[in-house]
Image (cartoon, rainbow, N blue to C red):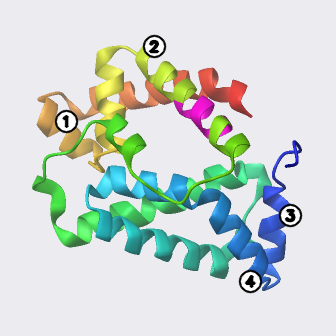
Amino acid sequence: MSSSPVPWEALLAEIARGDQAALAAFYDRTSRLVYGQTYRILGESGAAEEVTLDVYLQVWRQAGNYDPGRGTPIAWLMMIARSRALDRLRSSGWRGRESEPMDAAAAVAAPAQDPEEESALAERRRLVRSALAELGPGQREAIELAYYHGLSHVEIAERLGLPLGTVKTRIRLGMGKLRERLSLLD
């Protein structure tokens, strides 16, 4: 087992050149994260599996569009996953479902990874939970509603009974704090 970091950018470059083996390797190493994200948003395993496949189809088609100046390959992938899941959520009218707590996705079964990758992911999850816990309750709730439940700023304002500007400010400030805290991950 190698202790060197996964060459994410190199894998994306190979995928952009049409290398199916690179896509398979990328999928094997990241599908658990993508599935967890889509399941957390959609709350239904069948839909999460479909969206996960859609995400990798988009990666196959758009790997050449990845811009390292805008973030890490994993951040790019997770943004695709989040966007596709929210698109599915909005198109399906699933808005009224009861959402599970964020930690529920950690228990979702997905393809196993090697112990080193699993340890790194567990540490990343711990740091994210810790960073979220450091936010004030108003910021944390607004961010969770936006990013884990797919609500728009207007929907969050209506649900919380707050002015739209307050919701936007809470999300912006909270995301800034998270970005600062999580900058240690990269």
Badge 2 crowding class, 10 Å Cα cut-off, few under 14, some 14 to 19, many 20 or more, is some
Q: Badge 1 is on which residue? A: 157
Q: Which mark is residue 89?
A: none
Find residue 178 and report its horizontal and vertical position in percent: 54, 26
Mark 3–mark 4 distance (CA, rounded to whole Å): 13 Å
Find residue 122 and report its horizontal and vertical position in percent: 58, 34
Mark 1–mark 2 distance (CA, rounded to whole Å): 22 Å
Q: Amino acid at mark 4?
A: Gln
Going from N to C along the chain, the mark reached first, 1 or 3, is 3
Mark 3–mark 2 distance (CA, rounded to whole Å): 35 Å
Going from N to C along the chain, the mark reached first, 1 or 2, is 2
Mark 1–mark 3 distance (CA, rounded to whole Å): 42 Å
Going from N to C along the chain, the mark reached first, 1 or 4, is 4
Quadrant of the image containing the C terminus: top right
Q: Choose mark 1 or mark 3, whichever is in front.
A: 3
Q: Residue at x 17, y 62 (%)?
A: 94
Helix, strand or loop under label 4: helix
Q: Badge 3 is on which residue? A: 10
Q: Is residue 29 visible?
A: yes
Q: Amino acid at mark 3?
A: Ala
Secondary structure mostly taken by the magenta-highlighted segment of the chain:
helix
Q: Amino acid at mark 1?
A: Ala
Q: Badge 2 is on which residue? A: 134
Going from N to C along the chain, the mark reached first, 2 or 4, is 4
